[in-house]
Image (spheres, grey):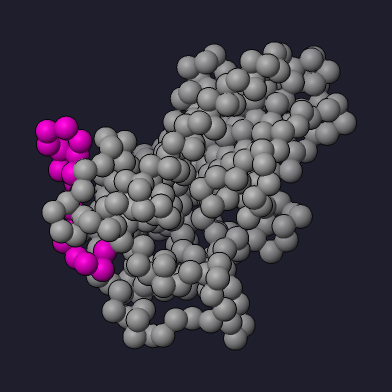
Amino acid sequence: MSRDPLIRRHLDRREFLTVGTGVFVALSFPLALRRHISLVKRSVPLMGTIAEIQVAHQDERFAEDAIDAAIAELQWVERTMTRFRSDSDIGRANLGAGRDGVRVSHETAFVIAAALRASSVSNGRFDPAVGAASELWDVLNRHEPPAGDRVQRLAARGFWRKIDVAEGLGSPRVRFDDPDLHVDLGAIAKGYGIDRATAVLRSRGVKHAIVTVGGDLFALGNSPEGEPWTVGIRSPHDEHALAATLRVSDRAVATSGDYERFFMWHGMRYHHLIDPATAAPRLTPFHSATVLANRCIDADAASTSVFGLPRDAALVIARRIDASADVIPLT
């Protein structure tokens, strides 16, 4: 992941395809640029990936200020819900919630509750509490699988059933009933952050924008042409090719795939999407699952839940999370 400072640039009239982050590219529009509508873009390292915000507006300074506010929302979510900081809500919970419980913010409690709902309707395919397995596999730094007995002891534990979120006086309290339980909100907090960033853009009067964090995005309003935004999903097999093209307006899109974070060992790809039933990367002929939904928090959780399933089975689960959801699996 790049650690460079903020990257800012304005698209000129000759550039109609923006190089997107993660698995997406967003297609922009030459006619709009001739009408003096600026497509202002900024990228910044966040949440273990790259966040990118594009705002279409006639006033570039206005767009820049709105982007500042949206990035601040994403940074707040990262600081509060990352498992990689001991002083975050999740870091403190993973250290102490197995004893007397830990107080967390209302926002963190909201995201944990949404994650537990996704766990319930997916029959445990989504589990926000398999952080210990994610830490064990550590696919960005490992070069071979961990010992089988270490994996097996974390398999099929139903960790999500052992999280209690209780409202009380003051802040909510989170408690764990299993010492091996580590919460990891990486499969849902990005979506929540995008929803917050989009809400801030709306509150500032932005009508046309795309907020992307890794494999998640929200397309706000329409393109400057008055048509839905056109978003391309990168091919799992060729980073320079598109596997599908979507036209989206006021819609969230999230993709979970095995081709961004993985290591190879003896010809086998070991990726970061852990199957709670095996505590190992999910074995599947599908390389990605893209979910469209009304909120990014739902699209994010649903794409992880249905990764590895054929479309009909995936739709059943995704529509339990958001009745309007659609799914695009890619082999």
Residue 200 in the figure: left or right of residue 87: right
From which residue to which does the magenta span run? 164-181
Residue 277: say if magenta: no
Give x and y (percent) for residue 251.
Answer: 51, 33
Residue 56 versus residue 89 in the image, above or below = above
Relative to the observer, which residue lies in front, 3 or 23?
3
Q: Residue at x 36, y 46 (%)?
A: 88
Give x and y (percent) for residue 1.
Answer: 63, 55
Q: Quadrant of the C terminus?
A: bottom right
Q: Is residue 275 visible?
A: yes
Relative to the observer, which residue lies in front, 40 or 17?
40
Residue 179 versus residue 112 in the image, above or below = below
Residue 257 in the figure: left or right of residue 40: left
Give x and y (percent) for residue 35.
Answer: 80, 14
- The residue furthest right is 14
Q: Quadrant of residue 149?
A: bottom left
Residue 284 in the figure: left or right of residue 208: left
Give x and y (percent) for residue 129.
Answer: 31, 59
Residue 178: say if magenta: yes
Q: Is residue 293 visible?
A: no
Q: Residue at x 36, y 62 (%)?
A: 131
Relative to the observer, which residue lies in front, 231 or 108?
108
Main secondary-structure element of the magenta-colored stretch: loop
Residue 226 versus residue 42 in the image, above or below = above
Q: Residue at x 21, y 55 (%)?
A: 97
Q: Quadrant of residue 236?
A: bottom right
